[in-house]
Amino acid sequence: MITRNEILETNRMIDDMNLDVRTITMGISLLDCADADIDKFNEKIYNKITTYAKDLVKTGDDLAKKYGVPVVNKRISITPIAIAAAGCETDSYVSIAQTLDRAAKKVGVNFIGGFSALVQKGYTESDRKLIASLPEALAVTERVCASVNVGTSRNGINMDAVKEMGEIILQTAEYTKDRECIGCAKLVVFCNAVEDNPFMAGAFHGVGEGDCAINVGVSGPGVVKKALEEVRGADFETLCEQVKKTAFKITRVGQMIAQEASALLDVPFGIIDLSLAPTPAVGDSIAEIFQEMGLAEPGAPGTTAALALLNDNVKKGGVMASSYVGGLSGAFIPVSEDHGMISAAEKGALTLEKLEAMTCVCSVGLDMIAIPGDTPATTISGIIADEAAIGMVNNKTTAVRLIPVIGRGVGQSVEFGGLLGYAPIMPVNTYSCAPFINRGGRIPAPIHSFKN
């Protein structure tokens, strides 16, 4: 039983260290909304979402007031639209994205995720329609987030999809170039995507999930940084113990909020995602944790080891605090959303290649990285392929969220605002990989996938 005293112990974390519940995400299955008539399908999904999630925002706000714990975002994830809309007789899914956007605005959530396709082994006709719809759909909506899963450790990597997604990302940038290419900030390419991720832009409600669920993402980089100040100069064993104890306390806060939200909304509790997700605010940074560990800047030698230590001990502490830890759970390293990462990138301490190395041991991958707008589609595809290979071989979730900023180059920056922050445009290796990407086909799964 989680007591109120446990929450009161965290008051200092909330007031001084930016502890928050980053998101309450309601997952909603749309499988029962299937219809050949796209207008009827749109009507069904709008009605279901606005019925199930009508009290989601109010519940999050009420819990924040009750316990004094900020509940920053209230969000919705849905069945991947390429699955839910597979029976619709239509050439485009843009109207579905617009319906999702209207539903999100109606209930007041800031994002709705699941305009998604799972193509790790091949395409259905519905997958093709969804992917073709992405640039326009992300341009004409504000709150819709999209993702495409191009590989898994069991299936290998669909290189046809990898090639296409490089082209789609550039098209999405063009469609939203008058708005800082913001469409690309709402589009993630995954390997080993998970079905219960509450964090955007990659959230969707998997087909293995129930009809509805409440998933909560907690965050507290500032709390971890302050805790490490107390053991400054200590050995690694002491450092690890401090991270574990702190992650336990953070997760207990999320567990209590999740259980109460589940009860108030009469929706089953799904998982706690105990990821350390930074914001642009000073004092809420993964980079500052690295500096407290003894690195002059993120990207310095030792950064990957520091991130591995942090990620592992966050998970070890969190799983003691909740029986239902899931999602991604670890440390995120989105460049634009972390003021310390931004600074390191501007100084040249943090490069794209070093970020790729760090993704071998962190929660996701190359996240919220601005690149020159004239980067070829095949180069973007090559970056996706590299990141997918890391995920496939290491049996972990990896992702790419790149923003090619049309009309700008290295040395300039792009401003997204809010939690998305701003990003310096980072240099990309200019040597061509086009013949490699244009081969087509599928990279087979690694030998360790045959575990049966």
Image: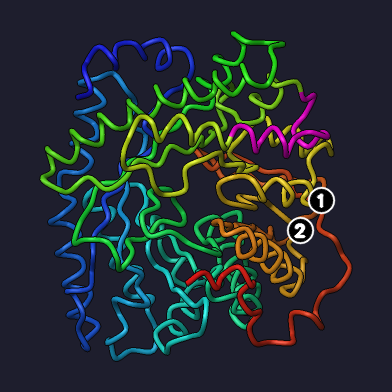
Relative to 38, is 5 above or below?
above
Q: Is residue 363 above or below residue 92?
A: above
Number of residues whose C-alpha sits closer than 10 Å to that of mark 2, classed few (under 14), some (14–19) or many (20 or more): many
Residue 308 counted in the magenta span: yes
Judged left or right of residue 139, residue 93 is: left
Q: Is there a contact, CB below 8 Å, between mark 2 and mark 1?
A: yes
Front-most of residues 239 and 299: 239
Residue 236 vertical position relative to residue 425 in the rendered view, above or below: above
Q: What residue appears at the point 80 percent right and 46 percent down from the top-left corner?
A: 351
- What are the residue bounds of the magenta stretch? 295-310
Residue at horizontal 22%, vertical 88%? Answer: 36
Q: Secondary structure at mark 1?
A: loop
Q: Position of residue 150 (x, y in %)?
A: 55, 72
Element type at mark 2:
strand
Q: Circle 1 sits on which residue?
A: 410
Lower position in the chain sequence, tag 2 or tag 1: 2
Please identify the quadrant where the N terminus is shown: top left
Q: Which residue is mark 2?
A: 372
Name the image quarter holding residue 271. Answer: top left
Left or right: 30 as drawn, with respect to 371:
left
Classify 90 as above or below 424: below
Name the residue at 82% across, 83% down: 435
Q: Amino acid at mark 1?
A: Val
Check if residue 313 falls in the magenta segment: no
Residue 330 location, x and y as percent? 52, 40
Q: Can you name the residue that lies furthest to the right here?
A: 431
Instruction: Decide if residue 252 is in sight here.
Output: yes
